[in-house]
């Protein structure tokens, strides 16, 4: 595994293809991979939220989800092969599950959204890839029981579509209870995008590193603080790290 230190985060310098190969290996060997991604916004959250930081740093694979992270790493001479977006990895893994007869569990979003998501995948692939699903609205007291039910579902892969930092903390806290699941990852708002509730930026916009702006334009009142303030803080963090490096 090729890891590099970027802003004190051990990011894996691997491509989408290499990440998928790691997942196949883990399933074949009956091992577990705890996966996490970082983007500009999450890196800023990690500066002040130590539990989130711990949950990310203790993951087995950390992919660069944001194009800004890939570009910023280049300033330090760090070559990350490509952005591995969580939603793209999820889509590839669902297709891989159909081809390899793996089973997936979907946790998160509203009940109507996760039900719609499962229906889409059942129609596109097969109901055989579905180990189970549940909405993302639950109390702390319910977490252990939910983790145990997922572990007993026969799932090889778990997707958790809950906002940060809850999804990262949940996965890190219960990965022992989820040891029967070979690959566990957080996918944020991916369920909403796949069912069409939220529109994803066109590929050109993604490649330009402006997917955040496309998202901001859809929900400016909700997203302005996360993106405008968060991105500014990330730029300042990178600049400070660049000029104070040894």
Image (cartoon, rainbow, N blue to C red):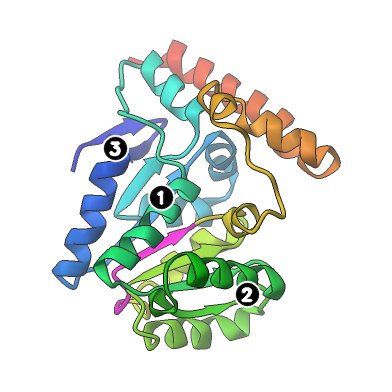
Disc 1 target residue: 89
**Secondary structure at numbered mark 2:** helix
The residue range painted magenta reads: 179-186
Location of residue 184 in the rendering, given as x and y in whole percent from the top left corner: 38, 65
Res. 29 image quadrant: bottom left
Q: Position of residue 45 (x, y in %)?
A: 59, 43
Q: What residue is at 34 percent from the left and 38 percent from the top? A: 11
88 in relation to 172, above or below:
above
Residue behind mark 2:
115
In-front residue for pair 53/102: 102
Q: Quadrant of the N terminus?
A: top left
Q: How far apart are the two marked residues, 3 and 2, measured between alpha carbons?
A: 31 Å
Q: Is residue 14 above or below residue 117?
A: above
Residue at 59% over, 26% down: 205
Residue 215 in the image: x percent, y percent?
Answer: 70, 38
Along the line of sight, the residue nearer the viewer: 128 or 150: 128
Whichever of labels 1 and 3 marks the residue nearer the N terminus, that label is 3
């Amino acid at each position: 595994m090729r890891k590099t230190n970027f802003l004190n985060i051990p990011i894996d310098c691997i491509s989408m293809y290499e990440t998928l190969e790691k997942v196949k290996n883990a399933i074949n060997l009956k091992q577990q991979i705890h996966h996490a991604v970082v983007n500009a916004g999450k890196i800023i959250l990690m500066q002040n939220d130590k539990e989130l930081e711990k949950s990310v740093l203790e993951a087995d694979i950390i992919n660069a989800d944001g194009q800004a992270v890939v570009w910023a790493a280049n300033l330090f001479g760090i070559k990350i092969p490509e952005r591995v977006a969580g939603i793209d990895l999820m889509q590839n893994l669902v297709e891989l599950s159909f081809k390899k007869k793996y089973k997936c569990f979907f946790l998160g979003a509203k009940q109507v959204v996760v039900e719609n998501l499962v229906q889409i995948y059942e129609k596109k692939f097969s109901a055989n890839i579905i180990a189970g699903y549940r909405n993302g609205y639950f109390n702390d007291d319910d977490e252990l029981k939910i983790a145990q039910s997922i572990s007993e579902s026969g799932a090889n892969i778990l997707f958790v579509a809950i906002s940060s930092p809850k999804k990262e903390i949940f996965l890190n806290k219960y990965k022992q209870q989820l040891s029967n699941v070979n690959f566990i990852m957080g996918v944020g708002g991916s369920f909403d995008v796949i069912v069409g509730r939220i529109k994803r930026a066109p590929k050109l916009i993604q490649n330009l590193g402006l997917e955040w702006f496309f998202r901001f334009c859809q929900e400016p009142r909700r997203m302005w603080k996360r993106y405008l303030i968060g991105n500014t803080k990330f730029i300042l963090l990178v600049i400070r790290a660049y000029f104070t490096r040894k």
